[in-house]
Amino acid sequence: QVQLVESGGGLVQPGGRLRLSCIVSDSISRFIVISWYRQAPGNRREFVADISILGGTQYADSVKGRFNISRDNTKNTVYLQMDSLRPEDTAVYYCHGIMSGSSEYYWGQGTQVTVSS
């Protein structure tokens, strides 16, 4: 069973920065895309950013220019660098991966990010 484990969340002041990590128990090269989603209380889970097996990236409009997604194949880890954080970025952030060549997908357990003064 493939596992995705997020870390790096916490409490930060507005304007601050955090880096989230998603460590995958299998080779991330087996995933066609790995994404970050977030869910704030009372809201639906929403897409934040993703990175494909070829390194292409996409971002939600709300985070463009502030967040950066990257991957380190040697560490089987995907990162989400979050800068200029705003209170509206407060949410549980989840890692999601879709396996290449199949419809299998996996979610991590989430990490809490709170932006507050």
Image (spheres, rainbow, N blue to C red):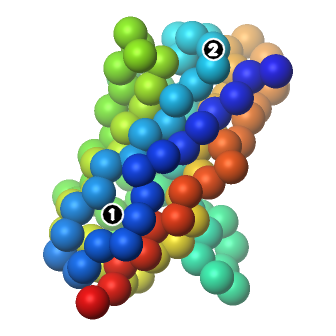
Q: Are marks 2 and 1 in contact (CB under 8 Å)?
A: no
Question: Dividing the picture into quarters, in which one does residue 47 lie?
Answer: bottom right
Label 2: state its secondary structure. loop
Q: Quadrant of the N terminus?
A: top right
Checking the image for residue 63, the label placed there is 1
Q: Residue at x 52, y 72 (%)?
A: 91
- Other residues around mark 2 within 10 Å, as few (<14) / some (14–19) / many (≥20): some
Question: Dividing the picture into quarters, in which one does residue 60 lie?
Answer: bottom left
Please, is residue 79 above or below residue 114 in the view? above
Question: Disc 2 versus disc 1: distance between alpha carbons?
Answer: 28 Å
Please, is residue 4 above or below residue 65 in the view? above
Q: Which residue is mark 2?
A: 26
Label 1: state its secondary structure. loop
Q: Quadrant of the C terminus?
A: bottom left
Question: Dividing the picture into quarters, in which one does residue 89 lie?
Answer: bottom left
**Where is residue 113 shown, x and y percent of the image?**
45, 67
* Viewer can see residue 24: yes
* Viewer can see residue 58: no
Q: Residue at x 23, y 62 (%)?
A: 17
Q: Could you tell me how many numbered marks the image carries?
A: 2
Which residue is at the far bottom? 117
**Where is residue 16 shown, x and y percent of the image?**
20, 69
Q: Amino acid at mark 2?
A: Asp
- Disc 2 versus disc 1: nearer the observer: 2
**Where is residue 37 shown, x and y percent of the image?**
56, 55
Please, is residue 77 above or below residue 112 in the view? above
Of the image marks 2 and 1, the number of the one nearer the N terminus: 2
Please, is residue 106 above or below residue 61 in the view? above
Q: Amino acid at mark 1?
A: Val
User: Left or right: 37 with respect to 108?
Assistant: left
Depth check: 67 or 22 in front? 22
